[in-house]
Image (spheres, rainbow, N blue to C red):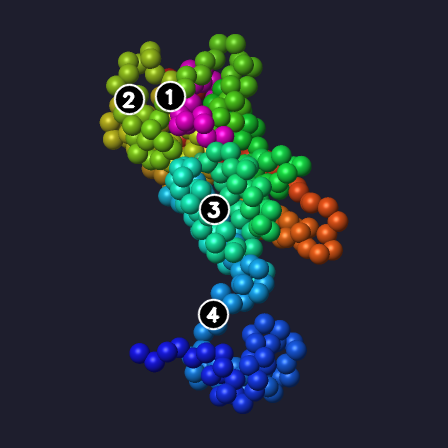
């Protein structure tokens, strides 16, 4: 197999110096249009593909941005990723995606990998406390923005949604329907988003004297985990059942809905009013369109890239001081059939 053309081959073919080819690739405004056309024609005829490693070495970083999310199986994160990719492309960068799967060691391996790849910066929805790792990264010239997690503004920029307010909105909505025996399904409260949503729901419950909130364990935050919770509910007696269920994300709520639909014993919303969180695309198309708390995923992804650009600017030679911002979006209640107006019973 013939070796791939080198920058020297292109220079010889276009009858210019190697430096001229480098300028066409990196500083095209320094080259006359006539010479540029000749070089680009040689690149095309030889099928030359630039080796970015050398440029990365010289520039000290690549044109890529590392993005680590908790679960690519969750449409919430893929929607954030897509928005970040679109915003990154507008500034000539690409996104390298890592899925931590809620696992701290996988997350750490991706942080190592992105550092080796000399990414321009890192966006991360962290599993746990990665402050020390992120401090090390920044010392090596790689800034970080926390995504879907509020950070200490004196140390990092972050973009998130007020999950406490979101949890309050969800529980308050069920209470306003007249539901009083609520259940929360969220997975481990070690996940900050889950803990904040539960806290908000508890705030709403405290406002209604005869209301209660039971926390139901789930083996994760997936549809399957939701199915497991739903299977437990259908085995309960009528007086033990909640009349309103708030799930910490839509995947869990869709799983609960599937179980109740398959067992034909409990109706949504008549017997159990059900609300999720995220407002993923599958919520509106569920067999009983799902009420949810909407997170502005497009704004989250775009803003993460904007904040990273500000961090990179602040690290530039003319920067005067570190520049961090915490952007917090307000969640929105989206009412659909799964909680439509039905009073209990
Ligand atoms: O990963 C847990 C949840 O946190 C997701 O469903 C999404 O809501 C994120 O904010």
Could you classify mark 4 by the number of other residues whose Cα lies within 10 Å: few (under 14), some (14-19), or many (20 or more)? few
Q: What stretch of residues is rendered in magenta?
A: 177-192
The one of 182 and 49 positioned closer to us in this rendering: 49
Horizontal side of residue 243 vs 61, given as left or right: left
Give the number of the mark in front: 4 or 2. Answer: 4
Question: Which is in the foreground here, disc 1 or disc 4?
Answer: 4
Occupied quadrant, residue 164: top right
- Mark 3 lies on a secondary structure that is helix
Q: Which residue is mark 2?
A: 232
Residue 188 percent location from the top left of the image = 41, 27
Mark 3–mark 4 Cα distance, whole angstroms, equals 23 Å
Picture layout, residue 311 above or below residue 237: below
182 within the magenta span = yes
Residue 10 in sight in this render: yes
Q: Which residue is mark 4?
A: 51
Local packing at callout 2 (Cα closer than 10 Å; few below 14, some 14-19, many 20+) is few
Q: Secondary structure at mark 2?
A: helix
Earlier-in-chain disc, 2 versus 3: 3
Label 1 sits on residue: 216
Above/below status of 37 relative to 292:
below
Say the numbered circle drawn on residue 111. Answer: 3
At x 56%, y 15%, the residue is 207
Quarter placement of the N terminus: bottom left
The quadrant of the image that shows the C terminus is top left
227, 317: nearer the viewer: 317
- SS at mark 4 in the image: loop
User: Would you identify the image quadrant in which residue 29 lies?
Assistant: bottom right
Which comes sooner in the sequence, label 1 or label 4?
4
């Amino acid at each position: 197999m013939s070796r791939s053309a080198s920058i020297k081959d292109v220079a010889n073919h276009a009858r210019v110096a190697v430096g001229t080819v480098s300028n066409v690739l990196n500083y095209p405004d320094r080259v006359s249009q006539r010479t540029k056309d000749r070089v680009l024609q040689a690149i095309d005829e030889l099928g030359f593909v630039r080796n970015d490693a050398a440029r990365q070495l010289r520039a000290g970083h690549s044109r890529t941005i590392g993005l680590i999310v908790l679960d690519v199986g969750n449409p919430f994160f893929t929607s954030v990723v897509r928005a970040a990719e679109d915003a990154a492309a507008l500034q000539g960068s690409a996104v390298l995606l890592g899925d931590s799967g809620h696992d701290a060691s996988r997350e750490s391996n991706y942080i190592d990998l992105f550092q080796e790849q000399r990414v321009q910066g890192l966006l991360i929805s962290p599993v746990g406390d990665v402050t020390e790792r992120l401090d090390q990264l920044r010392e090596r010239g790689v800034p970080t923005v926390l995504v879907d997690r509020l950070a200490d503004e004196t140390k990092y920029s972050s973009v998130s949604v007020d999950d406490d307010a979101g949890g309050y909105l969800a529980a308050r909505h069920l209470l306003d329907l007249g539901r009083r025996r609520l259940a929360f399904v969220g997975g481990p409260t070690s996940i900050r988003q889950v803990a904040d949503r539960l806290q908000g729901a508890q705030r709403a419950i405290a406002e209604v004297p005869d209301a209660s909130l039971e926390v139901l364990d789930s083996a994760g935050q997936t549809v399957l985990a939701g199915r497991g919770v739903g299977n437990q509910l259908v085995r309960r007696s009528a007086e033990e059942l909640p009349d309103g269920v708030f799930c910490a994300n839509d995947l869990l709520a869709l799983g609960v809905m599937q179980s109740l639909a398959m067992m034909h014993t409990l109706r949504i919303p008549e017997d159990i009013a059900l609300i999720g969180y995220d407002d993923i695309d599958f919520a509106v198309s569920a067999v009983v369109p799902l009420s949810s708390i909407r997170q502005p995923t497009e704004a989250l992804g775009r803003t993460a890239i904007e904040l990273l650009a500000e961090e990179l600017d602040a690290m530039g030679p003319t920067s005067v001081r570190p520049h961090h911002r915490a952007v917090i979006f307000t969640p929105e209640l989206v009412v659909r059939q799964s909680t439509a107006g039905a009073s209990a019973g």
